[in-house]
Image (cartoon, rainbow, N blue to C red):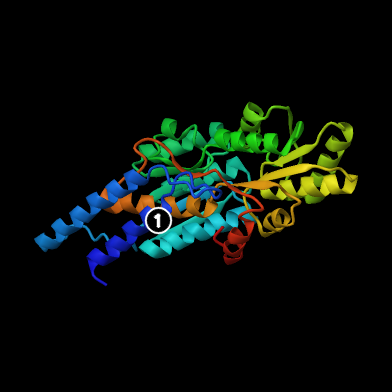
C-alpha cells in the first residue's frame, strides 16, 4: 500500500472515531467533526507536497519506534476491558507500541506509573484523572519534559491546567443532567444515586448533574466497591429499607446499577433503575424492561482516540479539539435501541 493511501486510512479512522457527543437515541452528529475534517485536509495537503518533493523527512506511515503509555485507574472489569481493546486496536492500526497500566483505583500507584513512564522517555502519555490533587503534579512534570499528554475518561475539568493537549471523554455533569430528565419522564420522586468509588470526582459529578435537572429528591451516597458486589448490594438494600420514599436508583456505573436492581427486587420494591456505561448484563436487563436506561460514554473511543492523537502529534504535529474537549458522550441505551447495541457488546467494542 502506498504512503498516501496508508495515511488516508489513518485520517479516515480519525473522522470515523473522533466522534464527540454520539447520541444512541437520535444518531446525533459529533462535536468537533469539523476540526477532524480540517486536520484531515491539512494532512492530506502535506501528503501531496511530500509526494511532489520525493524527499520525505518524516515517515508518517510507521510508528514502530514510538511508545505510548495509557495509565488509568482501571480495574479488570467490563468497562475498562472495552476501553483497553480500543487502545490496542488503535496501536495496531498505526504501528506503535502501547504500554497499558491500570491502578485498580489507587491514585498512588497511578502517579508512580506516570513517573516511571516519564523516566522511560515515553513518546506520549494518556491518563485518566479520578484524583486530581494526586495526579495533576506528575502529569505537569510530563508536559514539562516535552511529552504529549492527553487525559481520558475523567479529567475534563483539569486537562487545561495540566497543559494536556486535549481531553477525550464526556462531561459528567451533562451526562447526569440527561439522567435526571429521564427520571422525570419515568415519574420518579426520590432517586438514590449510588457511587462505587469514594474519591472519584467524576462519579460525584454524575450525581450532581442528576440533582440539577431532576425535579424530585436526590440522595447521593457511597455504596461500596464493584469488587465486592455482595457488600454493595447489601449497602443499597439498607439505604432503600431506611427510606420508603425512594422509588428510583441511579448507579453511576454498570455494576452498581445491577446491584441496585437486585437490592430492589430482594425487597419487592418497584424501582425505576438507571445506570452508566455498558455491560452484557445491563443490556439484557434493559431489553427485559428491568432497567430503564444506561448512559453510554462510548469507552472504546476513549481508548482508541488518544492513541491516534498521540501518533498524529508525534508524526505530523497535528492536534484536535482547539483547546476544547473531544466528547464521546453522553448517549443513551434504552429498550428501543438495546438490541442494536447488544451485538456490538458481544463483539467487545461497546
Instruction: Categorize mark 1 by other alpha carbons within 10 Å: few (<14), some (14-19), many (20+).
Output: few
The residue at 82%/50% (across/down) is 262
- Is 235 positioned to the left or the right of 78 in the image? right
- Is 76 positioned to the left or the right of 189 in the image? left
Q: Which residue is mark 1?
A: 16
- Counting from the top left corner in percent of width and height, residue 258 is at 75, 50
Quick one: quadrant of the N terminus?
bottom left
- Counting from the top left corner in percent of width and height, residue 16 is at 40, 56
- Is 245 positioned to the left or the right of 305 in the image? right
Q: Secondary structure at mark 1?
A: helix
Which of 150/141 is in front?
Answer: 150
The residue at 37%/46% (across/down) is 33
- Residue 216 appears in the picture as rendered: yes
Q: Quadrant of residue 67?
A: bottom left
- Residue 198 appears in the picture as rendered: no
The residue at 67%/47% (across/down) is 293
Which of 305/123 is in front?
Answer: 305
Quick one: quadrant of the C terminus?
bottom right
Amino acid at each position: 500500500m502506498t504512503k498516501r493511501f496508508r495515511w488516508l486510512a489513518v485520517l479516515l479512522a480519525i473522522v470515523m472515531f473522533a466522534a464527540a457527543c454520539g447520541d444512541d437515541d437520535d444518531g446525533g452528529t459529533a462535536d468537533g467533526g469539523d476540526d477532524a475534517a480540517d486536520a484531515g485536509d491539512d494532512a492530506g495537503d502535506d501528503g501531496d507536497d511530500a509526494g511532489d518533493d520525493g524527499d520525505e523527512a518524516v515517515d508518517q506511515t510507521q510508528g514502530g519506534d514510538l511508545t505510548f503509555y495509557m495509565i488509568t485507574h482501571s480495574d479488570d472489569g467490563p468497562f475498562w476491558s472495552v476501553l483497553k481493546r480500543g487502545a490496542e486496536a488503535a496501536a495496531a492500526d498505526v504501528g506503535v507500541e502501547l504500554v497499558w497500566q491500570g491502578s485498580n483505583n489507587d491514585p498512588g500507584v497511578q502517579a508512580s506509573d506516570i513517573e516511571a513512564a516519564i523516566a522511560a522517555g515515553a513518546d506520549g502519555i494518556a491518563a485518566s484523572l479520578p484524583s486530581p490533587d494526586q495526579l495533576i503534579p506528575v502529569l505537569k512534570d510530563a508536559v514539562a519534559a516535552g511529552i504529549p499528554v492527553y487525559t481520558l475518561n475523567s479529567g475534563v475539568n483539569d486537562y487545561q491546567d495540566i497543559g494536556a493537549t486535549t481531553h477525550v471523554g464526556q462531561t459528567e455533569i451533562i451526562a447526569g443532567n440527561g439522567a435526571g430528565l429521564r427520571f422525570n419522564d419515568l415519574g420518579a420522586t426520590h432517586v438514590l444515586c449510588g457511587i462505587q468509588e469514594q474519591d472519584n470526582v467524576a462519579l460525584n459529578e454524575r450525581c450532581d448533574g442528576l440533582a440539577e435537572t431532576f425535579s424530585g429528591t436526590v440522595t447521593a451516597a457511597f455504596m461500596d466497591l464493584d469488587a465486592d458486589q455482595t457488600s454493595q448490594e447489601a449497602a443499597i438494600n439498607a439505604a432503600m429499607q431506611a427510606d420508603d420514599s425512594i422509588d428510583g436508583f441511579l448507579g453511576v456505573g454498570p455494576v452498581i446499577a445491577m446491584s441496585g436492581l437486585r437490592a430492589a427486587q430482594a425487597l419487592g420494591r418497584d424501582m425505576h433503575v438507571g445506570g452508566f456505561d455498558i455491560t452484557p448484563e445491563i443490556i439484557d436487563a434493559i431489553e427485559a424492561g428491568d432497567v430503564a436506561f444506561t448512559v453510554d460514554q462510548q469507552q472504546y473511543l476513549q481508548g482508541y482516540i488518544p492513541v491516534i492523537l498521540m501518533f498524529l502529534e508525534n508524526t505530523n504535529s497535528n492536534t484536535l479539539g482547539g483547546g476544547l474537549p473531544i466528547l464521546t458522550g453522553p448517549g443513551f441505551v434504552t429498550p428501543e435501541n438495546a438490541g442494536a447495541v447488544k451485538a456490538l457488546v458481544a463483539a467487545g467494542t461497546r
